[in-house]
């Protein structure tokens, strides 16, 4: 299979907080927001160094006509990080959880 990777975009004109991802989905957690009752999904991804957990938006997937993620499938593309990476970036120390939003395919 393809190698797992998280590569921050590095050109000065690139938007900050964006990275190219190619990660396999290890597990999908189906969660419910206790305040709103809205269901959300958290994906556990095979990132370099250790698994990475990200949240996805069902409405965004539906709007963009993308298939829902499947265990064993891959998340590929350019993403905006709304938070901080907990691992997986070369040479980075532990930080905190992240949420990603896909901005391009």
Image (tube, rainbow, N blue to C red):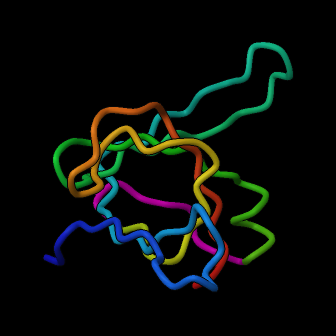
Q: Which of the 4 image quadrants contains residue 67?
A: bottom right
Residue 78: % across, % down: 53, 76
**Residue extending furthest top?**
34
91 in relation to 13, above or below: above
- Towards the viewer: 6 or 37: 6
Magenta stretch bounds: 65-73
Horizontally, residue 42 falls left or right of residue 62, namely left
Residue 8: % across, % down: 43, 69
Q: Which quadrant does the C terminus fall into?
A: bottom right
Q: Which residue is rendered at x = 50% and y = 45% of the image?
A: 54
Instruction: Residue 67: say if magenta.
Output: yes
Horizontally, residue 40 falls left or right of residue 77, namely right
Residue 94: % across, % down: 31, 32
Q: Which quadrant does the N terminus fall into?
A: bottom left
Residue 26: % across, % down: 28, 48
48 in relation to 76, above or below: above
59 in relation to 96, above or below: below
């Amino acid at each position: 299979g393809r190698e797992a990777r998280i590569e921050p975009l590095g050109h000065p004109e690139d938007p900050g907080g964006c990275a190219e991802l190619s990660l396999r989905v290890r597990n999908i957690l189906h969660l419910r927001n206790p305040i709103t009752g809205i269901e959300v999904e958290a994906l556990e991804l095979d990132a370099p160094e250790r698994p990475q957990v990200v949240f996805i938006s069902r409405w965004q997937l539906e709007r963009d006509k993308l298939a829902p993620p499947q265990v064993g499938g891959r998340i590929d593309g350019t993403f905006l990080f709304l938070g901080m990476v907990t691992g997986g970036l070369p040479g980075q120390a532990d930080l905190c959880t992240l949420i990603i939003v896909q901005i391009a395919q």
